[in-house]
Image: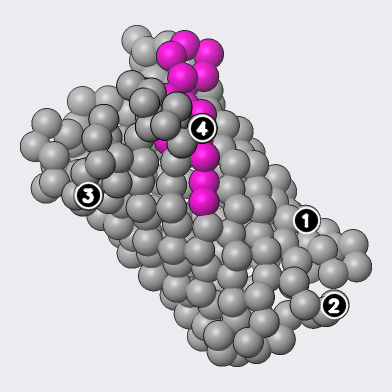
């Protein structure tokens, strides 16, 4: 199976890592700051090189106990690493709602994005369904592990371009290292532009999250 996947002309592998900080200002208002990098691991051949660096900020407001809205801004440095590519400024609007059944938390997230490049502006709409739960006991304690899985559907539209549909599947195992520190590692598989010529993309994910 591995030889089949790596033999596809439309397969790309990435490693994506990030460091994030969640900062609570008030009970119902918080900030999220994140720095991430994405590197090629496979692009027609085994090849490790940086593709981009992202700086991300979100402001989140709880509108009820289990619902929140957020506004985000992101800047992607792409041209620095690939001269024929453009940097990107992105604005995001988000709505999130969660529910619980025993020790399982379910989440629904809706996003709209404006991805602004020098040559093109793309509007993207996203829906994600996620669930997470501790792997030991009914609640997550320091030193214990948890599982997060999700699937996300995306639609991208831009002037003079055909609409693009994507689907993503993600699974992460995380550890609560400290009361305010989490470490996560996992995989994500993306089917991009699957109504035309499907691009198969595999991500290896690592993430370190601090909360204040």
Confirm whether the magenta stretch covers residue 147.
Answer: no
For marks 4 and 3 on the same chain, the one whose residue lies earlier in the sequence: 4
For marks 4 and 2 on the same chain, the one whose residue lies earlier in the sequence: 4
In contact (CB < 8 Å): disc 4 and disc 3: no
For marks 2 and 3 on the same chain, the one whose residue lies earlier in the sequence: 3
Q: Secondary structure at mark 4?
A: loop
Neighbourhood count class around disc 4 (C-alpha, 10 Å): few under 14, some 14–19, many 20 upward = few
Where in the figure is residue 135, as x and y percent of width and height?
A: 74, 71
- Which residue bears the numbered disc 2? 138
In contact (CB < 8 Å): disc 1 and disc 2: no
- Which residue bears the numbered disc 1? 106
Among the 4 quarters of the image, the one containing residue 90: top left
Decide whether the magenta segment is chiefly helix, strand or loop. strand
Q: Nearer the viewer, mark 2 or mark 3?
A: 3
In contact (CB < 8 Å): disc 2 and disc 3: no
Cα–Cα span, label 1 and label 2: 15 Å
């Amino acid at each position: 199976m591995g030889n089949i996947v790596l033999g596809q002309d439309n397969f790309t592998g990435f490693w994506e890592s990030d460091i994030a900080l969640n900062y609570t200002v008030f009970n119902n208002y918080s900030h999220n700051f994140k720095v991430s990098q994405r590197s090629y691991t496979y692009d027609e051949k085994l090849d490790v090189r940086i593709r981009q660096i992202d700086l991300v900020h979100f402001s989140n407001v709880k509108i009820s106990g289990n619902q929140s809205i957020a506004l985000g801004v992101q800047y992607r440095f792409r041209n620095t690493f690939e001269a024929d590519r453009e940097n990107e400024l992105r604005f995001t609007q988000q709505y999130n709602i969660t529910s619980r059944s025993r020790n399982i938390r379910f989440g629904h997230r809706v996003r709209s994005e404006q991805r602004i490049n020098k040559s093109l502006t793309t509007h993207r709409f996203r829906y994600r369904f996620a669930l997470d739960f501790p792997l030991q006991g009914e609640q997550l304690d320091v030193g214990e592990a948890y599982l997060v899985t999700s699937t996300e559907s995306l639609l991208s539209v831009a002037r003079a371009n055909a609409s693009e549909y994507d689907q993503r599947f993600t699974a992460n195992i995380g550890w609560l290292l400290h009361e305010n520190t989490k470490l996560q590692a996992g995989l994500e598989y993306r089917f991009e532009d699957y109504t035309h010529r499907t691009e198969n993309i595999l991500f290896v994910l690592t993430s370190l999250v601090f909360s204040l």
